[in-house]
Image (cartoon, rainbow, N blue to C red):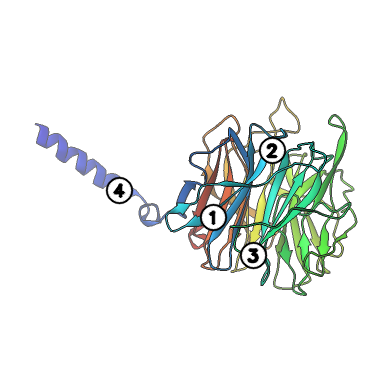
Amino acid sequence: MRLQMILRYFRTLLVALAALPMAAIAAPSPILLSEFIDPAPPYPQAHASTIVELPDGTLAAAWFGGTGESRPDVTIWFARSGAHGWDKPVSVADGQSADGTRYPTWNPVLFQPPGGPLTLFYKVGPNPRGWWGMVKTSSDGGRHWSTAQRLPEGVLGPIKNKPVVLADGSWLSPSSREVGTPEENHWFIRMERSTDRGKTWTVEPQIASPMGIEAIQPSVLTFPDPTRLALIARTRQGALAMSWSHDAGKSWSPLVAADLPNPNAGTDAVTLADGRQLIVYNHSAHWPDQPGNGPRWPLNVGLSDDGVHWRNVLTLEDKPLPDGYAYPAVIQTRDGLVHISYTYNRTHIRHVVVDPARLGG
Protein backbone atom coordinates (compact mmCIF):
# COMPACT_ATOMS: atom_id res chain seq x y z
CA MET A 1 0.00 0.00 0.00
CA ARG A 2 2.81 2.39 0.91
CA LEU A 3 4.61 1.63 -2.37
CA GLN A 4 1.45 2.43 -4.30
CA MET A 5 1.14 5.78 -2.50
CA ILE A 6 4.74 6.64 -3.36
CA LEU A 7 4.23 5.71 -7.02
CA ARG A 8 1.03 7.75 -7.13
CA TYR A 9 2.88 10.76 -5.69
CA PHE A 10 5.63 10.57 -8.31
CA ARG A 11 3.08 10.13 -11.12
CA THR A 12 1.25 13.23 -9.92
CA LEU A 13 4.52 15.15 -9.71
CA LEU A 14 5.55 14.14 -13.23
CA VAL A 15 2.16 15.20 -14.63
CA ALA A 16 2.45 18.56 -12.88
CA LEU A 17 5.98 19.13 -14.18
CA ALA A 18 4.96 18.17 -17.69
CA ALA A 19 2.22 20.80 -17.58
CA LEU A 20 4.67 23.59 -16.72
CA PRO A 21 6.21 25.71 -19.49
CA MET A 22 9.83 24.78 -20.10
CA ALA A 23 10.88 28.32 -19.14
CA ALA A 24 9.33 27.85 -15.70
CA ILE A 25 11.35 24.68 -15.18
CA ALA A 26 14.66 25.63 -16.72
CA ALA A 27 14.95 29.42 -16.30
CA PRO A 28 17.72 30.14 -13.78
CA SER A 29 17.18 32.80 -11.15
CA PRO A 30 18.71 36.21 -11.90
CA ILE A 31 19.78 36.41 -8.23
CA LEU A 32 23.20 34.81 -7.89
CA LEU A 33 23.99 35.78 -4.29
CA SER A 34 22.25 37.39 -1.31
CA GLU A 35 24.17 38.08 1.89
CA PHE A 36 24.57 40.52 4.75
CA ILE A 37 27.61 42.79 4.56
CA ASP A 38 27.35 43.18 8.35
CA PRO A 39 26.04 39.84 9.70
CA ALA A 40 27.03 40.74 13.28
CA PRO A 41 26.64 44.52 13.35
CA PRO A 42 28.34 46.52 16.12
CA TYR A 43 25.41 48.99 16.17
CA PRO A 44 21.63 48.73 16.64
CA GLN A 45 20.71 50.47 13.37
CA ALA A 46 22.18 50.79 9.88
CA HIS A 47 21.00 52.71 6.84
CA ALA A 48 21.85 54.40 3.53
CA SER A 49 24.48 52.16 1.94
CA THR A 50 26.70 52.83 -1.06
CA ILE A 51 28.70 50.31 -3.08
CA VAL A 52 31.64 50.63 -5.49
CA GLU A 53 34.07 48.51 -7.51
CA LEU A 54 37.73 49.31 -6.86
CA PRO A 55 40.38 49.23 -9.63
CA ASP A 56 41.49 45.70 -8.68
CA GLY A 57 37.92 44.39 -8.86
CA THR A 58 37.35 44.37 -5.11
CA LEU A 59 33.99 45.59 -3.90
CA ALA A 60 33.68 48.15 -1.12
CA ALA A 61 30.63 49.46 0.69
CA ALA A 62 29.80 52.16 3.21
CA TRP A 63 26.72 53.17 5.23
CA PHE A 64 25.83 54.99 8.40
CA GLY A 65 25.20 53.19 11.67
CA GLY A 66 24.58 53.89 15.34
CA THR A 67 21.78 53.91 17.88
CA GLY A 68 19.41 55.59 15.43
CA GLU A 69 19.27 57.99 12.51
CA SER A 70 20.04 61.62 13.49
CA ARG A 71 21.70 60.67 16.79
CA PRO A 72 25.21 62.01 17.50
CA ASP A 73 26.80 58.57 17.78
CA VAL A 74 25.94 57.72 14.15
CA THR A 75 29.16 57.30 12.11
CA ILE A 76 30.12 56.14 8.63
CA TRP A 77 31.02 52.45 8.44
CA PHE A 78 33.07 50.81 5.68
CA ALA A 79 33.87 47.28 4.54
CA ARG A 80 35.72 45.59 1.69
CA SER A 81 34.87 42.24 0.15
CA GLY A 82 37.66 39.70 0.37
CA ALA A 83 38.26 36.12 -0.70
CA HIS A 84 36.16 34.87 2.20
CA GLY A 85 33.37 37.42 2.11
CA TRP A 86 33.07 40.87 3.56
CA ASP A 87 35.64 42.12 6.02
CA LYS A 88 34.54 43.24 9.46
CA PRO A 89 33.06 46.76 9.17
CA VAL A 90 35.07 49.64 10.56
CA SER A 91 34.02 53.19 11.37
CA VAL A 92 35.86 55.62 9.07
CA ALA A 93 34.17 59.01 9.61
CA ASP A 94 32.28 60.76 12.39
CA GLY A 95 30.64 64.10 13.06
CA GLN A 96 33.06 65.44 15.67
CA SER A 97 33.48 69.21 15.20
CA ALA A 98 36.43 71.40 16.15
CA ASP A 99 34.57 72.85 19.14
CA GLY A 100 33.84 69.38 20.51
CA THR A 101 30.22 69.21 19.40
CA ARG A 102 29.29 65.81 18.04
CA TYR A 103 26.82 65.68 15.13
CA PRO A 104 25.37 62.66 13.32
CA THR A 105 26.70 61.62 9.93
CA TRP A 106 24.47 60.88 6.95
CA ASN A 107 24.26 59.30 3.48
CA PRO A 108 27.77 58.23 2.45
CA VAL A 109 28.55 57.97 -1.27
CA LEU A 110 31.59 56.06 -2.51
CA PHE A 111 33.02 57.18 -5.85
CA GLN A 112 35.98 55.64 -7.69
CA PRO A 113 37.08 58.04 -10.45
CA PRO A 114 39.32 56.59 -13.17
CA GLY A 115 42.97 56.95 -12.20
CA GLY A 116 42.18 58.67 -8.91
CA PRO A 117 41.77 57.82 -5.25
CA LEU A 118 38.66 56.28 -3.80
CA THR A 119 36.46 59.18 -2.65
CA LEU A 120 33.97 59.14 0.20
CA PHE A 121 31.36 61.88 0.27
CA TYR A 122 29.09 62.18 3.30
CA LYS A 123 27.07 64.70 5.27
CA VAL A 124 27.42 65.99 8.84
CA GLY A 125 24.87 68.04 10.72
CA PRO A 126 21.79 67.98 12.93
CA ASN A 127 19.33 67.18 10.12
CA PRO A 128 19.01 67.26 6.30
CA ARG A 129 18.03 70.94 6.39
CA GLY A 130 21.13 71.90 8.33
CA TRP A 131 23.78 69.43 7.23
CA TRP A 132 26.95 70.16 5.23
CA GLY A 133 29.07 68.18 2.79
CA MET A 134 32.28 66.37 3.77
CA VAL A 135 34.82 64.38 1.77
CA LYS A 136 37.67 61.95 2.43
CA THR A 137 39.92 60.05 0.02
CA SER A 138 41.87 56.81 0.13
CA SER A 139 44.78 55.80 -2.09
CA ASP A 140 44.76 52.16 -0.96
CA GLY A 141 41.19 51.05 -1.50
CA GLY A 142 39.82 52.17 1.84
CA ARG A 143 42.45 50.73 4.15
CA HIS A 144 43.57 54.21 5.17
CA TRP A 145 41.77 57.54 4.77
CA SER A 146 42.79 61.17 4.49
CA THR A 147 41.72 63.80 7.00
CA ALA A 148 38.12 64.85 6.43
CA GLN A 149 37.61 68.08 4.49
CA ARG A 150 34.49 70.20 4.41
CA LEU A 151 33.16 70.92 0.93
CA PRO A 152 32.91 74.60 -0.07
CA GLU A 153 30.01 76.63 1.29
CA GLY A 154 26.82 75.77 -0.58
CA VAL A 155 28.21 72.51 -2.00
CA LEU A 156 26.70 69.36 -0.49
CA GLY A 157 28.13 66.72 -2.81
CA PRO A 158 26.09 63.74 -4.01
CA ILE A 159 23.14 63.49 -1.65
CA LYS A 160 22.63 59.72 -1.86
CA ASN A 161 23.66 58.33 -5.24
CA LYS A 162 26.94 58.09 -7.12
CA PRO A 163 28.36 60.80 -9.40
CA VAL A 164 29.01 60.04 -13.06
CA VAL A 165 32.04 60.92 -15.15
CA LEU A 166 30.94 62.64 -18.36
CA ALA A 167 32.56 62.35 -21.79
CA ASP A 168 34.63 65.50 -21.22
CA GLY A 169 35.93 64.18 -17.89
CA SER A 170 33.67 66.34 -15.73
CA TRP A 171 32.17 64.89 -12.58
CA LEU A 172 28.42 65.35 -12.36
CA SER A 173 27.17 65.01 -8.81
CA PRO A 174 23.45 64.26 -8.29
CA SER A 175 22.56 66.64 -5.49
CA SER A 176 19.43 68.10 -3.92
CA ARG A 177 18.25 70.35 -1.11
CA GLU A 178 15.78 70.26 1.77
CA VAL A 179 15.02 73.72 3.14
CA GLY A 180 12.64 75.10 5.76
CA THR A 181 11.39 73.75 9.07
CA PRO A 182 10.54 70.15 10.02
CA GLU A 183 6.85 71.01 9.66
CA GLU A 184 7.14 73.04 6.46
CA ASN A 185 10.06 72.26 4.20
CA HIS A 186 10.67 72.20 0.49
CA TRP A 187 12.60 69.72 -1.66
CA PHE A 188 14.36 70.44 -4.94
CA ILE A 189 17.22 69.22 -7.11
CA ARG A 190 20.41 71.16 -7.86
CA MET A 191 23.14 69.29 -9.68
CA GLU A 192 26.80 69.98 -8.91
CA ARG A 193 29.71 69.80 -11.36
CA SER A 194 33.48 69.64 -11.10
CA THR A 195 35.76 70.08 -14.13
CA ASP A 196 38.97 69.59 -12.12
CA ARG A 197 38.40 66.21 -10.46
CA GLY A 198 36.80 67.54 -7.32
CA LYS A 199 39.09 70.48 -6.56
CA THR A 200 36.35 73.03 -7.23
CA TRP A 201 32.61 72.74 -7.75
CA THR A 202 29.84 74.63 -9.52
CA VAL A 203 26.31 74.41 -8.16
CA GLU A 204 23.83 74.34 -11.03
CA PRO A 205 20.45 76.16 -10.93
CA GLN A 206 17.46 74.53 -9.30
CA ILE A 207 15.63 72.21 -11.70
CA ALA A 208 12.19 73.65 -12.42
CA SER A 209 9.08 71.88 -11.19
CA PRO A 210 6.00 73.68 -12.56
CA MET A 211 3.77 70.77 -11.56
CA GLY A 212 4.81 71.08 -7.92
CA ILE A 213 6.75 67.82 -7.78
CA GLU A 214 9.19 67.88 -4.85
CA ALA A 215 12.17 65.63 -5.54
CA ILE A 216 15.48 64.73 -3.91
CA GLN A 217 18.23 62.10 -4.20
CA PRO A 218 18.48 61.81 -8.01
CA SER A 219 20.38 59.20 -10.00
CA VAL A 220 21.96 60.05 -13.37
CA LEU A 221 21.44 57.91 -16.48
CA THR A 222 23.52 58.14 -19.65
CA PHE A 223 22.88 57.39 -23.34
CA PRO A 224 24.97 56.71 -26.45
CA ASP A 225 24.73 60.40 -27.29
CA PRO A 226 27.10 61.86 -24.66
CA THR A 227 25.14 65.11 -24.49
CA ARG A 228 21.94 63.31 -23.52
CA LEU A 229 21.35 62.52 -19.85
CA ALA A 230 18.38 61.74 -17.65
CA LEU A 231 17.81 61.78 -13.93
CA ILE A 232 15.29 59.85 -11.87
CA ALA A 233 14.51 60.83 -8.30
CA ARG A 234 12.52 60.23 -5.14
CA THR A 235 9.45 62.41 -4.52
CA ARG A 236 6.70 63.09 -2.02
CA GLN A 237 3.98 62.77 -4.66
CA GLY A 238 3.64 58.98 -4.94
CA ALA A 239 5.59 58.50 -8.18
CA LEU A 240 9.21 58.88 -9.16
CA ALA A 241 10.24 62.03 -11.04
CA MET A 242 12.36 62.40 -14.17
CA SER A 243 14.18 65.21 -15.97
CA TRP A 244 16.22 65.29 -19.19
CA SER A 245 19.29 67.10 -20.41
CA HIS A 246 20.50 67.51 -24.00
CA ASP A 247 23.66 69.48 -23.19
CA ALA A 248 25.57 67.10 -20.89
CA GLY A 249 23.77 68.25 -17.76
CA LYS A 250 24.22 72.00 -18.11
CA SER A 251 20.44 72.47 -18.26
CA TRP A 252 17.52 70.22 -17.41
CA SER A 253 13.89 69.94 -18.45
CA PRO A 254 11.15 70.55 -15.86
CA LEU A 255 10.43 67.63 -13.56
CA VAL A 256 7.71 65.22 -14.65
CA ALA A 257 6.29 62.06 -13.10
CA ALA A 258 7.77 58.74 -14.18
CA ASP A 259 5.60 55.65 -14.64
CA LEU A 260 6.88 54.00 -11.44
CA PRO A 261 5.38 54.38 -7.95
CA ASN A 262 7.36 55.79 -5.04
CA PRO A 263 6.40 55.66 -1.34
CA ASN A 264 8.67 58.61 -0.48
CA ALA A 265 11.74 56.35 -0.38
CA GLY A 266 15.21 56.44 -1.89
CA THR A 267 16.07 54.68 -5.14
CA ASP A 268 19.16 54.22 -7.29
CA ALA A 269 19.64 53.56 -10.99
CA VAL A 270 22.43 52.71 -13.41
CA THR A 271 22.92 52.54 -17.17
CA LEU A 272 23.95 49.00 -18.13
CA ALA A 273 26.70 48.23 -20.61
CA ASP A 274 24.08 46.96 -23.09
CA GLY A 275 22.26 50.32 -23.00
CA ARG A 276 19.32 49.30 -20.84
CA GLN A 277 18.48 51.45 -17.83
CA LEU A 278 18.08 49.63 -14.52
CA ILE A 279 16.50 50.97 -11.33
CA VAL A 280 16.12 49.52 -7.84
CA TYR A 281 13.06 50.90 -6.05
CA ASN A 282 10.10 50.12 -3.79
CA HIS A 283 7.15 49.22 -6.01
CA SER A 284 4.56 50.77 -3.71
CA ALA A 285 2.91 54.12 -3.19
CA HIS A 286 1.31 55.90 -0.26
CA TRP A 287 -0.74 54.48 2.59
CA PRO A 288 -4.32 55.79 2.30
CA ASP A 289 -4.22 57.14 5.86
CA GLN A 290 -0.70 58.60 5.62
CA PRO A 291 -0.44 60.91 2.60
CA GLY A 292 3.19 61.38 1.65
CA ASN A 293 4.48 58.08 2.97
CA GLY A 294 4.15 54.42 2.12
CA PRO A 295 5.58 50.97 2.87
CA ARG A 296 9.18 50.31 1.91
CA TRP A 297 8.35 46.89 0.55
CA PRO A 298 8.48 45.18 -1.81
CA LEU A 299 11.92 46.03 -3.19
CA ASN A 300 12.10 45.65 -6.95
CA VAL A 301 14.28 45.93 -10.02
CA GLY A 302 12.92 47.79 -13.03
CA LEU A 303 14.21 48.01 -16.58
CA SER A 304 13.77 50.48 -19.41
CA ASP A 305 15.01 50.45 -22.99
CA ASP A 306 14.58 54.18 -23.49
CA GLY A 307 14.58 55.73 -20.01
CA VAL A 308 10.90 56.61 -20.37
CA HIS A 309 8.93 53.38 -20.27
CA TRP A 310 9.72 51.17 -17.28
CA ARG A 311 8.76 47.61 -16.41
CA ASN A 312 9.06 45.77 -13.10
CA VAL A 313 11.18 42.67 -13.81
CA LEU A 314 12.35 41.30 -10.44
CA THR A 315 11.29 41.31 -6.81
CA LEU A 316 14.24 41.28 -4.42
CA GLU A 317 12.23 41.35 -1.18
CA ASP A 318 8.51 41.22 -0.46
CA LYS A 319 8.01 40.14 3.17
CA PRO A 320 6.52 43.00 5.19
CA LEU A 321 8.90 44.24 7.87
CA PRO A 322 8.51 47.23 10.19
CA ASP A 323 11.20 49.25 8.39
CA GLY A 324 11.16 47.33 5.13
CA TYR A 325 13.94 47.36 2.55
CA ALA A 326 15.22 50.79 1.65
CA TYR A 327 17.80 53.13 0.16
CA PRO A 328 19.29 50.82 -2.47
CA ALA A 329 22.58 51.49 -4.25
CA VAL A 330 23.38 49.78 -7.55
CA ILE A 331 26.41 49.39 -9.82
CA GLN A 332 27.44 47.17 -12.72
CA THR A 333 30.92 45.72 -12.34
CA ARG A 334 33.37 45.08 -15.15
CA ASP A 335 32.33 41.42 -15.36
CA GLY A 336 28.81 42.53 -16.29
CA LEU A 337 27.11 41.58 -13.02
CA VAL A 338 24.89 43.99 -11.12
CA HIS A 339 25.58 44.55 -7.42
CA ILE A 340 22.92 46.01 -5.16
CA SER A 341 23.19 47.00 -1.52
CA TYR A 342 20.27 48.14 0.62
CA THR A 343 19.00 48.63 4.16
CA TYR A 344 17.37 45.53 5.63
CA ASN A 345 14.82 46.55 8.31
CA ARG A 346 17.24 49.22 9.58
CA THR A 347 19.31 46.45 11.21
CA HIS A 348 21.65 45.22 8.46
CA ILE A 349 23.02 46.09 5.04
CA ARG A 350 22.29 43.40 2.45
CA HIS A 351 24.28 42.75 -0.73
CA VAL A 352 22.64 41.04 -3.71
CA VAL A 353 24.28 40.04 -7.01
CA VAL A 354 22.07 39.92 -10.10
CA ASP A 355 22.84 38.64 -13.60
CA PRO A 356 21.21 41.22 -15.89
CA ALA A 357 21.25 38.77 -18.78
CA ARG A 358 18.63 36.73 -16.90
CA LEU A 359 16.25 39.63 -16.38
CA GLY A 360 13.22 39.19 -18.58
CA GLY A 361 10.74 41.72 -19.77
Q: Residue at x 48, y 59 (%)?
A: 358
Is 139 left or right of 232, judged from the image as shown? left
Q: Earlier in the sequence, mark 2 or mark 4?
A: 4
Estimate the spatial distance between the alpha carbons at disc 1 and disc 4, rounded to whole Å.
Answer: 43 Å
| Location of mark 3 (residue) | 139
Estimate the spatial distance between the alpha carbons at disc 4 and disc 3, rounded to whole Å.
Answer: 55 Å
In the rendered image, which quarter contains the C terminus? Answer: bottom right
Residue type marked 1? Arg
Residue type marked 3? Ser
Q: Position of residue 346 (x, y in %)?
A: 60, 35
Relative depth, front residue between 298 and 203: 203
Q: Residue at x 72, y 34 (%)?
A: 72
Residue type marked 4? Leu
| Location of mark 2 (residue) | 263
Tell me where residue 262 sits by quadrant: top right
| Location of mark 1 (residue) | 80
The crowd level at tag 3 (other Cα within 10 Å; few <14, some 14-19, many 20+) is: few
Q: Earlier in the sequence, mark 1 or mark 4?
A: 4
| Location of mark 4 (residue) | 17
Q: Secondary structure at mark 4?
A: helix
Q: Secondary structure at mark 2?
A: loop
